[in-house]
Image (cartoon, rainbow, N blue to C red):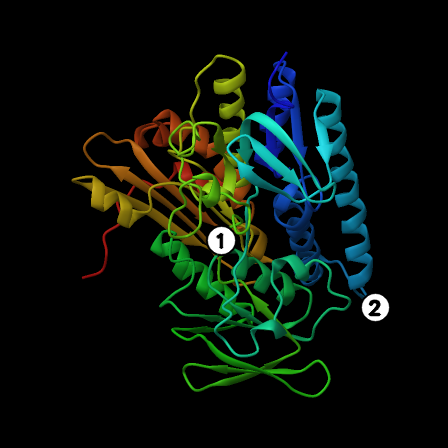
Amino acid sequence: MSDFDYDLFTIGAGSGGVRASRLAAQYGAKVGVAEEYRVGGTCVIRGCVPKKFLVYASEFGHAFDDAKGYGWSAENISFDWMKLIENKDDEIDRLNGIYIRNLKNAGADIFQSRATLKDKHTVHLHAENRDVTAKTILIATGGAPWIDESVPGHELGVSSNEAFHLKKLPKHVVVAGGGYIAIEFACIFKGLGCDVCLVYRGEDILRYFDRDISVQVHSELKRRGIRVITQSVFEKIEQCEGDQKRIYLSNGAEVDADLVFWAVGRKPATAGLGLEESGVELNKNGAVVVDEYSRSSVDSIFAVGDVTDRVNLTPVAIREGAAFAESEFNNNPSKVDYRFIPKAVFSQPPVGTVGYAEHEARNEYKNVDIYKTNFRPMKNMLTGSEERVLMKLVVDAQTDRVLGCHIVGPDAPEMIQCIAIAVKAGVNKADFDQTVALHPTAAEELVTMREKYKAPI
């Protein structure tokens, strides 16, 4: 008989925690899971899934305009924000139920409670005011939006958490941030008919992406009518009449809006968990420090997902959770390969990317060849839209291996998922060249780029 209540106790039922718990239970472990909000985590409940529904909704506005070029007419078009939110919530409820059912079917016990560590083997369940013990504890609490509390009036803004539950659609939105969350919500609100202003402290948006992606997306945001202010930050937010707020910027400008949206980053959700008191090492950002097998500095405590601040993506958290379960409960030591992970930004147009950005490749490889094209897609020829597509390949000149692929344009994320398979497998530029084009498609440009790009002198 075990000396512990559970073989594994997981704190946090997001994508990584659920996958780890389900697999461990299927491998015969007695598993408990605590979640203080809803099973499914940020991605399912208040992240990528509901956000993608809002992205879809915002794209229909552009589609109605584009349809006119193809002979369609649509009169008396209207949009109902609350209907969208209600339908989104119904689907989130369904997914939440599936996650709960899957955990229970695997044999795991679920506790609707905040849980904190008392020591390396003891978890306190606050809702039940009792302790449970476990041989192994997994921290999978994810991340949370960060708001700059040094800004007077910061509390007048909302984060992505609250944005999914607004009671009405705002007329004018000011977004703080230049990363993918800021860009995506700026495009969502603009597509739904709002006036949007984006304020970012850096020289250009999407600074961790390839420079050509940053420039292309910036250009498309402005073309769609989104005001972009760079090298500036919020200095103060004041409440005005009704819903109106006034935002004072560090460049001396003032912007009025009825919704202020904070999208300046996320931080690991480790505060108040009792980690440091239990001897778990955290880095300066508050993330749990782990090795390649997700072990923390305490031998019985592990961590996966955004709480470790490695690669903060849902599929990565799932891979980390699975590798943990394989290693600890199936006698199959496993670790995650973080190379060539595909990424997407669901802006309008969207971004798909895998592998090295040009500047990263030039820092690591002796000689790098660049192939790129920028064109109006065929679909836009009858609509009058000036939206353009960017495609770029980064190639190791010595081996001919494709090191990176970057796309901005319709269906870019769908394309990049397939391309990522080839890039991760070590495809060469010659393999692209020898592949017959599929015509007429935008994607055929990927296999017809022959001339190396030479930067203007």
| Residue topped by disc 1 | 267
In front here: 25 or 174?
25
Circle 2 SS class: loop
356 to 424, vertically: above or below:
below
Residue 280 in percent (x, y) is at 43, 39
Look at the picture and state if 181 lies above or below 331: below
Tell me: 130 left or right of 391. Answer: right
Q: Secondary structure at mark 1?
A: strand
Which image quadrant: the N terminus? top right
In the image, 175: left or right of 341?
right
* Mark 2 vs 1: CB contact within 8 A: no
- The quadrant in which residue 420 appears is top left
Q: Position of residue 211 (x, y in %)?
A: 34, 56
Locate residue 364, reporting x and y percent. 21, 41
Q: Residues within 10 Å of mark 1 (few under 14, many from 20)?
A: some
Quadrant the C terminus occupies: bottom left
In the rendered image, which quarter is residue 32 located in?
top right
Q: Which of 195/153 is in front?
A: 153
What's the distance in space between the residues labelled 2 and 1, CA to CA?
Answer: 44 Å
Give the amino acid type for the residue marked by disc 1 in the picture.
Lys
Check the image and report above or below for 233 versus 266.
Answer: below
Front: mark 2 or 1: 1
Residue 178 in percent (x, y) is at 46, 63
Mark 2 residue type? Asn
Which residue sits at x=52%, y=48%? 270
Regarding residue 440, the answer to whether it shows in the image is no
Query: Which residue carries the number 2 mark?
Result: 76
Q: Residue at x 41, y 83 (%)?
A: 251
